Amino acid sequence: MQSCPAFSAPFQRIQPRTALLASADGSFRQKLSDILTGLRWQVREAGGAADAWHQAQSALPEAVIVDSWLPDLDCGEFLREFQTSFPEVALLRSDGSFANGRGRATHKQELLFALQRSQTSDCDARNLAPATSGILVKAPGLDGVPRPATDDGPQSNRHMENTREDQVPHLSGAISRPRLDPTCSEKVRLAVCERLPEFVGEAPCMLEVSRRIRLVAPRSTSVLIEGPTGSGKELVAEALHRLSTRSRKPFVAINCAAIPETLLEAELFGHTRGAFTGAVQGRVGRIEAADGGTLFLDEIGEMPLALQAKLLRFVESGELQRIGDNETVKVDVRVVAATHRPLAQHTVTGAFRADLYYRLAVFLIRTPALVDHLEDLPDLVRHFLAHMGRQSPIKNIAPAALEKMRAHSWPGNVRELEHVLERAAILAGDASEISEDEIDFGVAIA
């Protein structure tokens, strides 16, 4: 990386027992900050590389903990540049390894202890004492490296599942902080092309989905997700919420096709007591329940036209009116919608309101059908078999069975694949391998 003009380090004295957390994941920073504060550390937080560099220039910390994915610069590049400019600061990666040999042993132990405990969701972060013997080795960091058992008990499977790779919410304060030099833009472009942990496989079409999610997640822009049934549209919506600044607020999902038309309006907007027959008490609607967070409208193409007009008013103004109420309520919600229908074509025929479509489709993400990324089939099979192996012994798949699956058209996409593998695992009984005979696609849908 070429030296950036902003990356100049004036001489200054280190502030003892001060840690700087450089991570785009706000929940990770918050949890680790709570634990370090309980260990009598002063903690500062940075949402990215430029922010961390700016804060280090202002007041040099004793240690910097760096996430393995930074949204504005490659982590390795940042560590090398930071170590060169601030060689006296202890640099700790989120997987528990030090990028340099700095830092006193007792403080190293406290930092490693805090990292390990930050992966344990049930701990009381503000009432922790530092470990008294032994230095904890690698916690499950962003690269998914497993943590050995400690005094807290054996390693839990959920720590292996919820690795911190690629969690990228909004860069707090990024507008007022100095930006990175333009020479770093290529590193940023390459970083955002990596897949998100929610998705399996490295097909270009799936990497494009991850790229688009990363680009739009920090914003409040409305997103429309289009794709065939079973292609993972709700996973995309959940990833958008997880990587956004709203990740600590509710993620509320509603399937517009699963609720009768007569009840859908009340479900969305809420109602007052006595607003209609059977309304014995008032109820907050799904939109209001998502205040501050994300509202996911699945199968938006099934919404009746009359209700589309009312939804349009909310999307435009951010205000809603409960059924039976004369007052409006202001709600701050990010709207993410999904459909398997070609909504743009439906606006031409009048089956869907064009004005609502353009409000929802400010940013479009398309989830591909499984046949469009069949090169990911082996990875998907291994993923689902490993998932089923949490409750029963993990089964392997015979090469002939895999070839049979490659030849299938997969009308139900990834969801169908999961069900076919579950069926095959049951049919295989106690056998350790799924054979070609156990691959049953069921009755074909005309």
Image: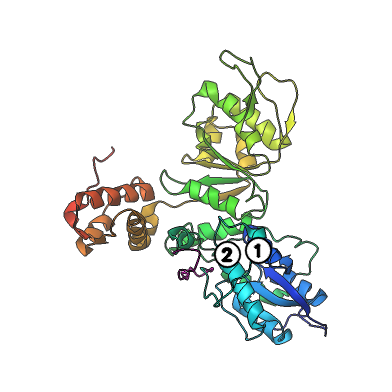
Pointers 1 and 2 in contact (C-beta within 8 Å)? yes
Q: Is residue 249 above or below residue 275?
A: below
Which image quadrant: the C terminus?
Answer: top left
Hey, which residue is sitting farthest front in the picture? 132
Judge whether residue 323 is colored magenta. no
The image position of residue 309, as x and y in percent, is: 63, 28
Which image quadrant: the N terminus?
Answer: bottom right
Q: Check disc 2 and give the amino acid type.
A: Arg
Residue with the mark numbered 2: 117
Q: Nearer the viewer, residue 370 or 79?
A: 79
Judge whether residue 143 is colored magenta. yes
Q: Residues within 10 Å of mark 1 (few under 14, many from 20)?
A: many
Tell me the number on the disc at residue 35: 1
Q: Residues within 10 Å of mark 2 (few under 14, many from 20)?
A: many
The image position of residue 378, as x and y in percent, is: 33, 62
Occupied quadrant, residue 252: top right
SS type, badge 2: helix
- The disc, 1 or 2, on the residue closer to the chain's N-terminal end is 1
Task: Please give the name of the residue rendered at 28% of the width and 38% of the height, measured from the top-left corner.
Answer: 445
Q: Nearer the viewer, residue 35 or 141?
A: 35
Q: Which residues are magenta?
A: 141-154
User: From where the camera sits, is residue 122 visible?
Assistant: yes
SS type, badge 1: helix
| Main secondary structure found in the magenta portion | loop
The image position of residue 216, as x and y in percent, is: 63, 55
Occupied quadrant, residue 274: top right
Q: Check disc 1 and give the amino acid type.
A: Ile
